[in-house]
Image: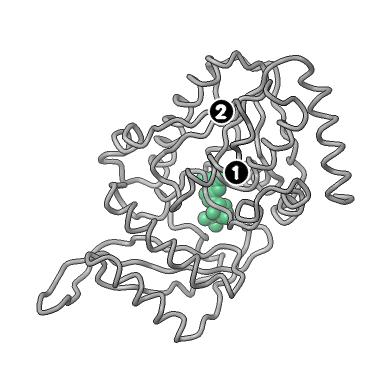
Amino acid sequence: MVNPGTFVDDAVDEIREQVGDAHAVIALSGGVDSSVAAALAYEAIGDQLTPVYVDTGLMRKGETDQIRETFSYMDSLRVVEAQDRFFDALAGVTDPEEKRHVIGEQFIREFEREAKESDAEYLVQGTIYPDRIESEGNIKSHHNVGGLPDAVDFEGIVEPVRNLYKDEVREVARALDLEEIVAERMPFPGPGLAVRVIGEVTPEKVEVARDATHVVEEELDEYDPWQAFAAVLGKATGVKGDNRVHGWVVSVRSVESRDGMTARAQELDWETLQRVQSRITGQNENVARVVYDVTHKPPATIEYE
Ligand code: XMP
């Protein structure tokens, strides 16, 4: 990338040329990639763009409100409340790939409905360079690549950040004055907290992962991780007050990486780890223990599923 300002000007021109007077639609995920793609497209074509945000119920704490606020300047923004439909679709599903598949399908269904209503001829996507590489290598099914509506006949796909790495996308976000929290926010997987909960995805487990991830993001900010979060592994025995309980085991993960393709587990000091542990077990009486994941990628992946 030459420089972020020039990139913005060129991308806006390119989108305008490609879309012309037609309508376009974009799925906002809350992440920096789709946020930047949406902001570029909105700058290029204004209200000819319909940004659609689907609240899957699998988002981080406060994320939906953040989206509403950040993109409130886009009059055409649509927020779809789909939490119950996602949890219903996921009931009983435990296989990681099947989970991704179910979420992807449900997402497409929600998005398709909005796309049809908006009469969009173009689909804007926030695909970045590493997404394309991983997708070609088929390491994991990424629901934001190549998995979007078949039933809606788009005339074309617009991918303004397709050649950028994540850190470059962040630079562009700053050049666009996208709020700090969006520009700086850690990457978050398309299937959301569902891949941070092992086994069946239930509202209770997702809530534990969400609250614990919030603590981890706050406490580990000073280590400047590429990603830091918490996952729910299963259940184990603990003691709360005078009682033995069978509570959740929460794993804390914090990694350094350039592009997510490889990663190193961060070395944290004991005091920090203990503070994280005590906040997570303190805020939720159903959490019995907290562990720290010291595994690099490879051999582990960053997410748990
Ligand atoms: P893994 O877990 O494969 O993750 O080491 C590498 C990077 O990709 C993110 N990730 C995803 N992003 N859709 C996405 O948009 C997905 O299905 C998905 N799965 C993993 C992960 O958070 C990390 O940054």
Q: Amino acid at mark 1?
A: Thr
Q: Residue at x 59, y 56 (%)?
A: 185
Q: Residues within 10 Å of mark 1 (few under 14, many from 20)?
A: some
The residue wearing badge 1 is 70
Camera-side residue of 163 and 74: 74
Pinpoint residue 59: horizontal percent, then vertical percent. 44, 47
**Which is in the foreground here, disc 1 or disc 2?**
1
Q: Residue at x 24, y 71 (%)?
A: 288
The residue wearing badge 2 is 148
Q: Residue at x 50, y 71 (%)?
A: 295
**Picture quadrant of residue 125:** top right
Mark 2, ligand 1, within 8 Å: the answer is no
- Above or below — where is 21 with respect to 213? above
**Under tag 2, what secondary structure?**
loop
**Under tag 1, what secondary structure?**
helix
Residue 227 located left or right of residue 282: right
Residue 88 located left or right of residue 271: left
Camera-side residue of 143 and 112: 112
Pinpoint residue 275: horizontal percent, then vertical percent. 41, 79
Residue 173 located left or right of residue 92: right
- Above or below — where is 214 with respect to 35? below
Colouring: one colour
- Above or below — where is 41 with respect to 177? above
Q: Amino acid at mark 2?
A: Leu
Pinpoint residue 264: horizontal percent, then vertical percent. 59, 71
**Picture quadrant of residue 251:** bottom left
**Label 1 – label 2 distance at C-alpha:** 24 Å
